[in-house]
Amino acid sequence: VLVAMSEGDVVATLHELADLRYVVDGTALACGLGGVYEDAIVEIHRANMSKLDENGKPIIGASGRVEKSDRFVKADVSKLLTT
């Protein structure tokens, strides 16, 4: 992925990203998590979006990374698993 991106090759970047997802999705299935994997993605996305401020904008810290707002609610994928 990094080579394709550094070369500005959009086609190769897309191919490599899709290949990575194929491996990750296959691993989730092999681990028996296929039924909850997409729900976990949704939960992670929800938590990441809760980092935004009240105007939906990211809060960028001194390090250049997105910081958590006071609206942040940590992801909880454990609720997706049943015994």
Image (cartoon, rainbow, N blue to C red):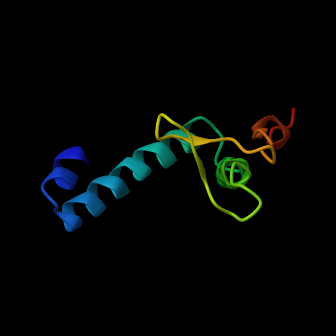
- Determine whether 8 is above or below 33 in the image: below
Residue depicted at 34% across the width and 54% down the height: 17
Pinpoint residue 64: horizontal percent, then vertical percent. Answer: 46, 41
Q: Depth check: give the residue in front, 71 or 6.
A: 71
Pinpoint residue 83: horizontal percent, then vertical percent. Answer: 87, 32
**Residue 61 relative to residue 40: left or right:** left
Pinpoint residue 6: horizontal percent, then vertical percent. Answer: 17, 51
Report the label total.
0
Residue depicted at 18% across the width and 53% down the height: 4
Q: Depth check: give the residue in front, 42 or 34.
A: 42
Residue depicted at 22% across the width and 66% down the height: 10
Which residue lies most toward the front here?
A: 62
**Residue 31 relative to residue 65: left or right:** right
Q: Quadrant of residue 68?
A: top right
Q: Depth check: give the residue in front, 65 or 28.
A: 65
**Residue 50 relative to residue 7: left or right:** right
Q: Depth check: give the residue in front, 74 or 12.
A: 74
Pinpoint residue 27: horizontal percent, then vertical percent. Answer: 50, 39
Q: Quadrant of residue 81?
A: top right
Q: Quadrant of residue 13?
A: bottom left
**Residue 78 relative to residue 58: left or right:** right
